[in-house]
Amino acid sequence: MTPHLIICISCAFFACLFAIRFNPTLVLLAYKKRILDSPGTRKLQTKPVPVIGGISVYMAAISSATVINIFQPTEDLFMAVAAISIIFFVGLLDDLTDISPTKKFIYQALIIIVLFASDSYRIDTLNGVFDIYDLPLSASLLISLLTGVGLMNALNMIDGVDGLSSGIGICTCGFCGSYFLIHHDIVYAALAFTFLGSLIPFFFCNVFSHKYKMFIGDSGSLVMGMLAYIFSCRILHEKDALIGSKNVSLMVAIFAVPIFDTLRVMTMRIKAGGSPFKADKTHLHHIFVSLKLPHMLITLIILFMAIIIEAFWFFLFSFNLGVTEHTLIVLAFCATLVWGVYFYFNNIKNNHPDRFEAYTNWILKLRKNPDKMISKIGRFIDNLKINEHGVLKHWTRKKIGKVHNR
């Protein structure tokens, strides 16, 4: 096992421990202070749920990030951590006070502009796509803004079923962390694995648990979007990359599902004469919800779609295509898969209701075993008695149960 891999595993391990330590305390605090997401017409939960998962992910990752500095100087991460911290507090403010989409958009744009002005993270090249290499300053700023703000909103808007946002975050951090590790970019590899470790406990609490269940909120999903932008800029400028100049299409492949789903949703909203930021039930996960699929299975299906896209990128890479051809084919495949799945089931739902009902009845028959497994895992997590010192004890679980029953 190489020293770099040991560093990454250590960062993920400590972040995971910190998250396990924080989660029960934060859930208890959320119920006491009523920091809850209440059921609504477009909400899928049936009771109020703590919306502080982003606090857990951020605190665990930042606490564990100190481990990186023990092994490796981390001056390069100053602007990244600063941007992540600012967008975390913007998201937390939105979770607590529900700020307007316009203000949130302005905050996001300002952070990207600061990163651009500092020359730390900017998209200033297309590496030969359409024979474009170095971009003019104005074009670079525009593309950086579209990419940064777009990724933050895409990962925020796709957060609709249990485990989806964090699952995408886990896959993204795992894939990007492995990419940086292969290229000996240890600082960014450690950053990716740190957030990977902080997301795993939240994922299990979000998907399986009842007593420790919480949502990631804007404070978490916006952090994931900022990380996606930072990783994209780093991949784009990776020197001596093993994939050559095809890193633009790789960036598209990694984030294809949230990007293409958000593009379709916003286009449909504008076409219907509404605001592109007004929430509705036209996302990819909503069509799976209408099929009566359990949240866990919806998350696995969408993550499997993301893996298919990444596998297709690797398959296409072996054909030694030109950069432009490779990128266009990847774009076409992403659009066909992500949009095709939605339009197929939506067409059946609207035009062939009998067949759609047959699908749902078939799914309901198959749900027994998966639902039992999810319940067993949930009971196991709920029976873990974790106090504020991270050891097993009975009182914290009893306190959370009392607050639940109020």
Image (cartoon, helix red, strand yellow):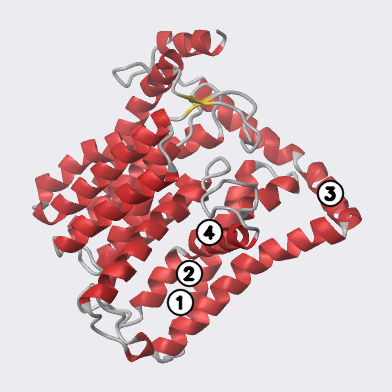
Q: Earlier in the sequence, mark 4 or mark 1?
A: 4
**Residue 180 position within the rendered picture, expressed as x and y whole percent measured from the top left:** 27, 64
Q: Quadrant of the C terminus?
A: top right
In-image side of 313 versus 267 (left or right): left
At 22% across and 36% down in the image, what residue appears? Answer: 63
Q: Answer above or below: position of 183 versus 155.
A: below
In the image, farthest residue toward the front: 273
Mark 2: which amino acid? Answer: Glu
Q: Answer above or below: position of 318 versus 198.
A: below
In the image, farthest residue toward the right: 354
Mark 3: which amino acid? Answer: Trp
Tell me if label 2 and label 4 are in contact, CB under 8 Å.
no
Alpha-carbon span between mark 3 and mark 4: 29 Å
**Residue 292 position within the rendered picture, expressed as x and y whole percent measured from the top left:** 75, 44
Alpha-carbon span between mark 4 and mark 1: 24 Å
Question: To which residue does mark 1 refer?
Answer: 314
**Label at residue 395:** none
Q: Earlier in the sequence, mark 2 or mark 4?
A: 4
Crowd around label 2: few <14 · some 14–19 · many ≥20 (10 Å):
many
**Residue 103 position within the rendered picture, expressed as x and y whole percent measured from the top left:** 36, 44
Could you say whether the residue bearing mark 1 is in a helix, strand or loop?
helix
Q: Answer above or below: position of 201 versus 282.
A: above
**Label at residue 262:** 4
**Label at residue 310:** 2
Mark 1: which amino acid? Answer: Phe
At 20% across and 43% down in the image, what residue appears? Answer: 65
Q: Please name which of the two marks, 2 or 4, marks the residue nearer to the observer.
A: 4
Question: To which residue does mark 3 refer?
Answer: 362
Q: Is residue 86 visible?
A: yes
Mark 4: which amino acid? Answer: Thr
